[in-house]
Image: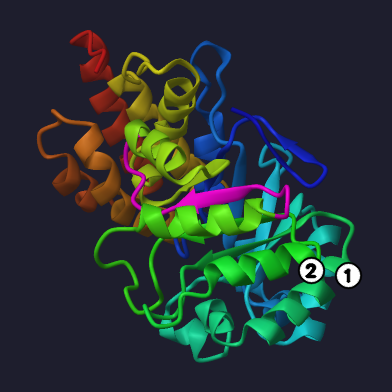
Amino acid sequence: MVLKIGSVQLETNLLLAPIAGYCDLAFRLVVRSVPGYKGHGTVGLACTDLLCPQAVLNENQKSLWLAATHPDDQPICMQLYGADGGIMAEAARWAEAHGATTIDINMGCPVDKVTKKNGGSMLLCDPKSTVKLAKMVVEAVGVPVTAKVRLGWDEKRMVAGELAVALADVGIAAVTVHGRTTEQKFRGRASLEGIARVVEAVKRGHDIPVIGNGDVKEPVDAKRMIDVTGCDGVMIGRGALGRPWLFRDTAYYLATGELPPEYPRVERAKLVLQHFENLLAMRDERIALNTIKRRMSWYSAHLQPWAGLRRGVQEVASAGEFREFMAAGIERMAEAGCVV
């Protein structure tokens, strides 16, 4: 299935979530490098980490890194968080000037350091002001502006349906709904019924896509979300962190109703090495090594059998040692004729 957000046509209706600390440029390029099986595509749109609007306007080093993109990292959504409409609009203009295909307003992050600044899901607590903010951002740029929300702050304040309609009224081009409240954070299960209510509310009077998010770990989860909620697309986050090929598998499954052959284990290991090389090209050796060591906790389950993988990675002390360690493992897999 394809998806259109405003004037932007996506290859698939699958989106990579903006997970703070994980979905940086190095990882996004890995996700995008996985070929679609039999031409059915992979990720349709990827998002940057959350961007503080004042920080990007000041162009401090960390924010420039978080906002970094590349010609191969397209189409790209830059996600902003904050509560000051003027500053958000100015930051949106900055994002458009720096390559954003779409701009997302984060209305769903439950983390204290974001909500204490009145950003993220705190915007759910004052829908009228939030809609005014969204209107300012929409009017500031020429690219589509979207919003990512939760169902509400808690079960007594389930505002997502009403808010999504009001956002569509002022020109928001798509709404992504995470099926939990702020109070839940990431506990429990995402509510497909809650997402369905938002879809129903929006579709009564608007023709913008609603994208579901939460607990998509397998291709069948994405299909269930679409079938149950009627959403137009699916945003995948943590399920893809150790499986960048999940978008390949899911796109094929949604198109055919069948799972493709498993992505070869040798190719999975090559993606880990590619992730490291991306990090090394963009950051220094110390950061690259520390990052890939942390990320191996996500990757390792999908590279087994590989005796001593996680321990061995923790022991490498240089880029050269990491390359040698991975190359030796890839060679063993190839010699064994590993397919999965």
Q: Is residue 280 visible?
A: no
Image point (26%, 13%), residue name? 339
Q: Are marks 1 and 2 in contact (CB under 8 Å)?
A: yes
Q: Give the structural element (helix, strand or loop) at label 1.
A: helix
Q: Is residue 327 above or below residue 10?
A: above
- Could you say which is closer to the camera, residue 109 or residue 272? 109
Q: Amino acid at mark 2?
A: Ala
Quadrant position of residue 143:
bottom right
The mark that comes first in sequence, 1 or 2, is 2
Q: Amino acid at mark 1?
A: Ala
- The residue under label 1 is 140
Q: Is residue 110 visible?
A: yes
Q: Is residue 257 above or below residue 61?
A: above
How dense is the environment of label 2, judged by Cα within 10 Å: few (below 14), some, or many (20 and up)? many
Secondary structure of the magenta portion, mostly?
loop
- Could you say which is closer to the camera, residue 167 or residue 183? 167
